[in-house]
């Protein structure tokens, strides 16, 4: 599969075979309000200040419909485009965003509720976190009276990808299916995202700003510290509806189910319309193989998620929930917002 090829072509992490059903920290799991551990994080996941001259944006994405998910890939390496990245509380090194993928319905269940979909933002670690993945999940609730415009744009790109495949099949120009598996230049990310281009001391510097330069406390929306304020987030982090989350240590939800993932599940869902949800589930069924036959793991209900796994070790997985009681918005001077 795609994950196995990723591991083998990049040597990013040692491939240890299929671990599905064999480990102590599986994913997805049920997340409850009464978590096993207290949140010890000092702040939200921190993103860079937006720099349109070098940052990759929505137009740099490559969209694909795979048998298991809708995916949107950022460039693996580009001399003129720096992929999004973020840092976590307590982690000095940054995580680079590789791709987005969407499953229906949600893979994680929060406080007994399974949401309509789950957008997973897959990052790889650098520095001391090399060999680790970070997946930030945004749950999706299809109960909004109106369409979400950002999500509608994503749907349109996948719709164009489906139309393009169908046209190629009609013309007989459809070649071997490409799931964007050429990872040979993947680690070239670091040539452009090295400390000289992306300050690896950002966490310490910004922590100093937060607790020294701006001693006041914001409300849950980042207000109350003029002229300091929250930082504008670049795409796709601007889809987040909250800065608070559930966190735990787990695995990939597809073979080989390697237990190398730091999970962050944002605790407020993105709301889309029912119409958008119907388009989403239709798109999930449109993957085609190299013979132009429909080839999808999506079932007749439009779902393509891994079932909930039983957590075998609450100590190993360490589920916790960060809320406004733990930290507020990270605030910056006006020139850094």
Image (tube, rainbow, N blue to C red):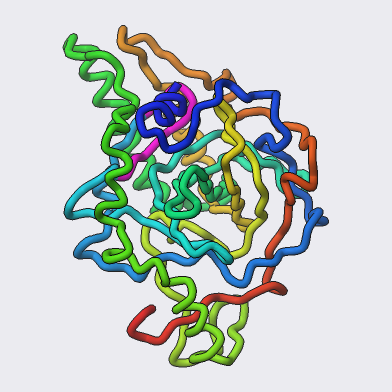
Q: Residue at x 62, y 72 (%)?
A: 42
Residue 208 horizontal side relative to residue 58, left or right: right
Does the magenta segment cover residue 72? yes
Q: Is residue 105 visible?
A: no
Q: Quadrant of residue 215?
A: bottom right
- Is the residue 86 above or below the residue 188 in the image? below
Looking at the rendering, in which quadrant would you find the N terminus?
top left
Residue 180 sits above or below residue 333 on the image: above
Q: Is residue 31 in sight in this rendering?
A: yes
Give the quarter of the image for residue 65.
top left
Nearer-the-camera pick, 108 or 264? 264
Residue situated in front as seen by the camera: 255 or 73: 255
The region drawn magenta spans 65-74
Picture residue at 59% right of the left edge, 52% below the top: 264
Residue 159: image location, x then y, percent = 33, 33
- The mark tally for this picture is 0
Q: Locate residue 292: give its quadrant.
A: top left
Q: Residue at x 72, y 45 (%)?
A: 317
Q: Position of residue 85 (x, y in %)?
A: 40, 57
Quarter the C terminus occupies? bottom left
Q: At which x and y percent is residue 240?
A: 51, 59
Vertical comparison of 112 with 163: above or below: below
- Residue at 55% x, 25% y: name it: 16
Expressed as whole percent of the image width and height from the top left, the position of residue 162 reads 32, 26
| 70 drawn magenta | yes
């Amino acid at each position: 599969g795609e994950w196995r090829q990723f591991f083998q072509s990049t040597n990013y992490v040692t491939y240890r075979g299929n671990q599905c059903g064999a480990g102590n920290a599986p994913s997805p799991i049920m997340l409850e309000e009464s978590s096993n551990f207290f949140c010890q994080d000092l702040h939200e996941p921190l993103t860079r200040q937006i720099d349109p001259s070098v940052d990759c944006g929505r137009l740099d994405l490559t969209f694909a419909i795979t048998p298991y998910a809708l995916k949107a890939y950022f460039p693996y390496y580009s001399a003129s485009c720096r992929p999004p990245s973020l840092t976590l509380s307590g982690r000095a090194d940054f995580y680079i965003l590789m791709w987005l993928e969407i499953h229906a319905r949600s893979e994680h269940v929060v406080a007994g509720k399974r949401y309509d979909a789950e957008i997973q933002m897959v990052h790889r670690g650098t520095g001391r976190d090399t060999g680790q993945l970070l997946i930030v999940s945004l749950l999706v609730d299809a109960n909004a009276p109106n369409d979400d415009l950002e999500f509608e744009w994503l749907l349109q790109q996948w719709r164009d990808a489906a139309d393009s495949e169908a046209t190629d099949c009609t013309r007989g120009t459809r070649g071997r299916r490409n799931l964007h598996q050429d990872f040979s230049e993947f680690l070239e990310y670091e040539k452009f995202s090295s400390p000289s281009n992306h300050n690896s001391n950002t966490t310490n510097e910004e922590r100093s700003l937060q607790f020294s330069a701006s001693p006041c406390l914001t409300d849950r929306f980042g207000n109350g510290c003029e002229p300091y304020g929250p930082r504008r987030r670049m795409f796709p982090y601007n889809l987040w509806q909250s800065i608070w989350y559930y966190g735990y240590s787990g695995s990939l939800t597809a073979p080989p189910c390697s237990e190398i993932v730091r999970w962050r599940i944002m605790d407020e869902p993105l709301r889309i319309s029912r119409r958008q949800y119907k388009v989403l589930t239709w798109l999930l069924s449109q993957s085609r193989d190299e013979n132009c036959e429909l080839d999808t793991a999506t079932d007749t209900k439009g779902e393509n998620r891994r079932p909930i796994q039983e957590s075998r070790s609450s100590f190993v997985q360490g589920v916790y929930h960060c809320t406004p009681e733990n930290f507020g918005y990270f605030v910056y001077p006006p020139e850094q917002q």
